[in-house]
Image (cartoon, coloured by chain):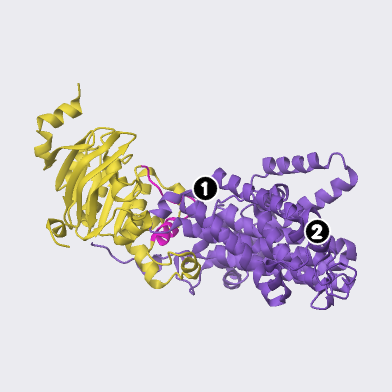
Chain colours: A purple, B yellow
Amino acid sequence: MSVTTTAEGRIPATQQPDGGMRFMQTVRDRRGTLLFILTAILLLVVFPVAMSNFRLNLVGKYLTYAFVSVGLVICWGYGGILSLGQGVFFGLGGYCMAMFLKLEASDPISTKIQSTPGIPDFMDWNQITALPMFWRPFKSLLFSLGAIPLLPGLVALVVGSAMFKRRVGGVYFAIITQAVASILSILIIGQQGYTGGVNGITDLRTLHGWDIRSDSAKRLLYYLNAVLLLGSVYLGQRMLGSKLGRLLVALRDKEERVRFSGYDVANLKTFAFVFAAVMAAIGGAMFTLQVGFMSPSFVGIVPSIEMVIGVAVGGRISLLGAIYGTLLVNFAKTYFSERFPELWLYLIGALFIGVVMVFPNGLAGLRSVTGVSLRDGWRRLVRAVRGATGASARAAAAQGGAGATVEVSTGGMAMVSVGQLEGGPPDDDAAEARRAEGGSR
Amino acid sequence: MIGPASNYLLAVEGLTVSFDGFKAVDDLSFYVGRDELRAIIGPNGAGKTTVLDLISGRTQPSSGSIVFNGEELRNMREHEIVRKGIGRKFQTPSVYESLTVFENLEMSYPAGRTAFGAWAFKRTRAVVDKVHEVAEAVYLVDRLDDRAELLSHGEKQWLEIGMLLIQSPALMMLDEPVAGMSAPERERTAELLKRICQTAAVVVVEHDMEFVKRIAHRVMVMHQGKWLAEGSMEHVQNDPRVIDVYLGH
């Protein structure tokens, strides 16, 4: 083939290899980093300072749902795989944690009034006289901590590969995940002696001897939760920034093309689904630790759908947006249910419909909306400044030229390409503004 | 592999597929040599696209064999067939609209094809150079930074050809590559295909007779799931059965 290599000079910065200077990428990262830092400050400083222990614990509980949201953004928002059964994985993670805590709380001394001391109380009530086999490994903290991501991950792997290899997708996949959620919650409720039934596993006290019910423990768990969540977001951002992230988008838009480019689509989808499941499971385990119990009401269809609503409200392609959406939906749920016990379900529904109608991209969509208006405002300001300073500014701009260049190469970077990013006109405006600014100083 | 099939890149023998008793492709045999540019023409519903579907693994044949480079492709999954070296372009251009031209090509670069592989994938100098080389070949080097949705219909066709090209396939199957193209674009596509078939075999399904006449070494006319005629374009154009099918009754 007669192909000539392109001259170096023509390669725009975005097409540079990794490790080279990737201009827009850097700026996009910077903007993302800023929002990430703001969120970190909000979660780690503002909330703990501004809130009472009770409210903070409540926020901590909401933030455990945000793990599910982070997974859903990757799986649904990017990969286009809508799972209406994330409660399954949230629940499995939560139950793994709860089983360990329950066994620790059921030592023979504190359960000596039972007919069989040393087993969880609900088993005793159900005439079970020995600890069931599948409970035994959960005496080990290490095993339990390992089971929290691995067991739900394995379930997701089996369900996911079974479905995706058979090309089950879209609404059918969503319905099957719903069925799985329904089955698991029915199973848990039905097997009262082994699972605690509809009440769930309650009365959890200590984690390896450390009382998790004290105020200081709750505060510490809140921090642990927030740090893990921020870590998950970071991991998610790294993943979405890689080729895998683009591949998921490609998968969502043109599955057939991805398949005919030599990718095993079923494996990629299974990966995204397992990733989301593991995220949800970590959230579930943190829920159990902070709230002190786990029950089937977090496993079934309704909680699974509520988790999706949080993501839709926050913006399904924004990891941070999904966190805010989840917080908002849960705050609203608490507020509405306290104030309007009769109406709150309708109000939540209205919130969902309202946000999705006005901002199809969720709250994260707001960012670009305000971005545009901010830019317009900036341009208007620039014009005003230019008009006022007039010719003298232009003369000064010639002198200040050298200074301006330096500035553009450093701080100006962010400014310039935010405009580019949003498909706005080229950076003449921003550059001129900068010059005018430099001149008027 | 022993037998006549080994001399060819692709040997299709007795290929048949029936959908609910309707034989869309009926006992079809043909052989494609390396570096050959072959065209399949025929009226609507003749089964041309189905033949490509069968070779690329999108549809399972009811009977027959498809041997590529000495390997039987039946029962292989689509991505495995792609990895063996068969590229496929769809009838309507199928590109990733929300990604840039560069990213579209990079996505098709044959590396990092598993989930973890894609996560660890690095945009090395070799990848960038290859993308540029292919973009140059498909006339899109100036559009690398544009999102694919901004391309014209013809440019999307080129992009999709480029996405196959970057995988250096031994066989490219193109379903209507010049549909929706302007005359100059057709011209350039013809040049492109002539260049491609110096290093790979090309099978083109096309309606545009003028275009086929310009590029194809050999033309096969398909009608109701069977071959009607085969040979040079002049030959098949003068075949009374072909005239009959095309002008119709």
Kind of element beneath mark 1: loop
Q: Amino acid at mark 1?
A: Gly
Residue beneath disc 2: A126
**B96 part of magenta stretch:** yes
Q: Amino acid at mark 2?
A: Asn
Query: Is residue A104 in view from this perspective?
Result: yes
Q: Chain of mark 2?
A: A
Name the residue located 22 percent from the left edge and 35 percent from the top edge: B42
Residue B62 at what x, y percent from top left? 29, 44
Residue beneath disc 1: A169
Direction from residue A117 to residue A176 in the image, left or right: left
| Residue in the foreground of this view, choosing between A419 and A73 | A73
> Looking at the picture, does residue A170 appear above or below residue A241?
above
Residue stretch rendered in magenta on the structure: B92-108
**Quadrant of the rendered structure where residue B209 is?**
top left
> Residue farthest to the top?
B249
**Quadrant of the rendered structure where residue A171 is?**
top right
Query: Is residue A382 in view from this perspective?
Result: no
Q: Residues within 10 Å of mark 2 (few under 14, many from 20)?
A: few
Direction from residue A3 to residue A359 in the image, left or right: right
> Looking at the picture, does residue B216 appear above or below residue A275?
above
Quarter of the picture holding the N terminus of chain A: bottom left
Q: Earlier in the sequence, mark 1 or mark 2?
A: 2
